[in-house]
Amino acid sequence: MAHMAMKDTISNKLQEAFTPERLQVVDESHLHEGHAGHRPGGQTHFRVYIVSAAFKGKSRVDRHRMINSALAAELAGSVHALAINAQAPGEGG
């Protein structure tokens, strides 16, 4: 199996778990050079913007837990930090 970028792995897992209306995964590793958890080659710090009906009626904490659960293997491994902006359709900007 070909090496898949962590950004793609995160995108695929979130797509499968939440069937989002919108999904953007941004690798922000370059912003953290010299900080804890940074490694040469990056792929350690990510920001996720996701809009999914799965989050309707859920608190911010519950939404984060859902995403952290879907990405448990990545968070236990090479992903050092994950910033999350999770919304239900029709919420926020």
Image (cartoon, rainbow, N blue to C red):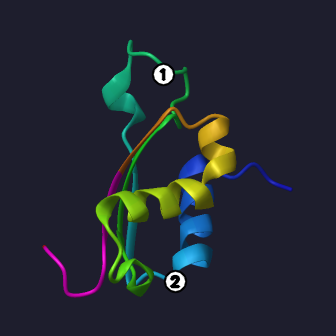
Residue on which disc 1 sits: 38
Q: Are marks 2 and 1 in contact (CB under 8 Å)?
A: no
Q: Is residue 8 left or right of residue 56?
A: right
- Classed neighbour count for the residue bearing mark 2: other residues with Cα under 10 Å, few (<14), some (14–19), many (≥20): some
- Which range of residues does the magenta coloring cover? 84-92
Q: Is residue 84 left or right of residue 19?
A: left
Q: Residue at x 53, y 37 (%)?
A: 43
Q: Quadrant of residue 90?
A: bottom left
| Of the pair 39 and 16, the residue shown nearer to us | 16
| Of the pair 43 and 15, the residue shown nearer to us | 15
List the single residue furthest toward the right. Answer: 1
Tag 2's secondary structure?
A: loop
Residue on which disc 2 sits: 19
Which circle marks residue 84 in the picture?
Answer: none
Of the residues shown, which amino acid type is indicated by label 2? Thr
Q: Percent position (x, y) of residue 45?
A: 44, 37
Q: Quadrant of the C terminus?
A: bottom left
| Of the pair 15 and 29, the residue shown nearer to us | 15
